[in-house]
Image: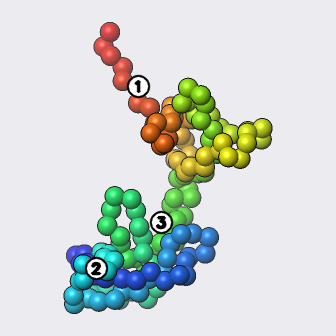
Amino acid sequence: MPLILVNFELKKETIPNTMIHYCTIKAYKHVYADMPVAAVQLDKKYDKPVALMRPGAITSIIEEEEAFRILAEDAKNNRDFKLVVNPDSTVRLATEDDKPEDILERRFPKNTDISKLIFFNNEILMMEIEETGE
């Protein structure tokens, strides 16, 4: 089904225990540039639309049930890590002895190798080590 752009408005109500907001689709015939824009499936009637916002992508309007499936998939494949940055910019798992203000909480795939993470430009990045043919 092709996607079209529509204007929408976020509601205050969210899916419980998430940051995914329910929304109202404002117009199908005209898209106004000074209002939030999202992609929807052409000719689909949404019973309980939610706005799925992802960094670097256009917002999508999806059904509530689809959002639950996406959240379940995320929970199956990812986990929250509590991390502390070492003085040499490497990262380690936090312990009970660490101060709360030193702990960074991030979500990564469950099989993330913490020893390959580094702190750079206020971000936690995965180091890739390239083997040379020597």
* Separation (CA) of disc 1 from disc 3: 32 Å
Q: Residues within 10 Å of mark 3 (few under 14, many from 20)?
A: few
State the residue at coordinates (21%, 88%): 30
Q: Residue beneath label 3, please?
A: 70
Asked whether, in this view, residue 100 is left or right of residue 132, the answer is right
Q: Position of residue 63 (x, y in %)?
A: 43, 79
Residue 99 as seen in the image, left or right of residue 45: right
Q: Amino acid at mark 3?
A: Ile
- What residue does disc 2 label? 34
For residue 129, the mark is 1
Mark 3 or 2, closer to the camera: 2
In front of the other: label 1 or label 3?
A: 1
Q: Amino acid at mark 1?
A: Ile
Q: Is residue 67 visible?
A: yes
Distance from disc 3 to disc 2, alpha carbons, whole Å, reads 29 Å
Give the amino acid at mark 2. Asp
Q: Secondary structure at mark 3?
A: helix
Residue 89 in the image: state x and y as whole percent: 54, 30
* Upstream in sequence: badge 1 or badge 3: 3
Relative image position of residue 17 (x, y in whole percent): 62, 70
**Which color mode does the image show?**
rainbow
- Within-10-Å neighbours for mark 2: few <14, some 14–19, many 20+: few
Q: Is residue 41 visible?
A: no
Q: Quadrant of the C terminus?
A: top left
Q: Residue at x 30, y 13 (%)?
A: 133
The quadrant of the picture occupied by the N terminus is bottom left
Which tag, 3 or 2, sits closer to the chain's start?
A: 2
SS for dot 1 = loop
Q: How dense is the environment of label 1, judged by Cα within 10 Å: few (below 14), some, or many (20 and up)? A: few
State which mark lies toward you, 2 or 1: 2
